Amino acid sequence: MDILSILLFCIGLVFRLTTKLFYPGKIILCIDFVVFCLRLMAIFTISQTLGPKIIIMMDIFFFMFLLSIWVMAYGVAKQGILIQNDNRLDWIIRGAVYEPYLIIFGNFPENIDNAGFNINSCSMNGTDPMKPKCPVLNENQMPAFPEWLTIIMLCVYLLFANILLLNLLIAIFNYTFQEIHENTDRIWKFQRYQLIKEYHSRPSPPPPFIIVKVLFIMIKSNCYFVICRIRLHNKSILSENVMIFKPVIKTYGFGVIVSV
């Protein structure tokens, strides 16, 4: 997240300095602000009360994998049954992913039966960029809703997504909270150690002044490298000289003769 936030900041700053890319740069900086805020949550690990509770948020990522299967299954099937030959990618994604996701929060769809459908809310041939394409037409040039199928699919989807999966998420949160509450002190000590270790291993100046510290580390490393090369060179010369002038000890009877 550090690399992503700094990279987005640099890209957004460069785009903001140009006239043509001013608005895309603003969008990138807004996304970068979200990444910075999420990264800032790591500082709460220093708190003994809030730190261990952050682990609960990790459960929602595994829950989203299960939820995405049902969202994609219902959304793609519903889009394929109702809409035919729609070439607009944005409206395809809206109908297959966005609308099924909003159903979980109570936004009931109006384009699956004749009860709440309005023919003026859609485009017959899909040429209006502000309206979705109308469902498949019958012989009377009216939307043909296979209500026996779309209503059943919606009921099954709401049963699994709204009731089973959401209650499963609540149960997972409850279990994780109990496990964390029993080991709060131990988890907090590990988190505090990791946070202190992380900040101790990093340069003290904040970006973009961190470049000064990086240059200092590079110069210091190069100096150490040069000194080590000189020491190794001197050591090799010294060892060669020692081998040349190494004394040879010979013994003859009771006498000792030392020769160089």
Image (spheres, grey):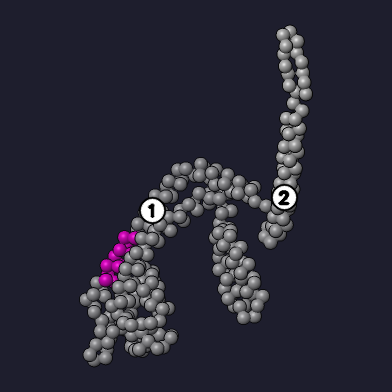
Q: Which residue is identified by label 2?
A: 222
Which of the pair 169/72 is nearer the observer? 72
> Which quadrant holds the C terminus?
top right
Q: Which of labels 2 and 1 is toward the front? A: 2
Q: Amino acid at mark 1?
A: Ile
Q: Which residue is identified by label 1?
A: 172
- Residue 21 image point, x, y percent: 61, 78
Query: Circle 1 — which element?
Result: helix
- Residue 52 image point, x, y percent: 50, 49
- Quarter of the image where one finds residue 125: bottom left
Q: Residue reaching furthest top?
A: 254
Q: Which residues are magenta?
A: 153-165
Instruction: Look at the picture and state if 255 lies above or below 149.
Output: above
Examine the structure image and report whether residue 129 is included in the region drawn in magenta. Answer: no
Query: What secondary structure prevails in the magenta region?
Result: helix
| Left or right side of 61 for 219 | right
Instruction: Look at the picture and state if 112 lies above or below 47.
Output: below
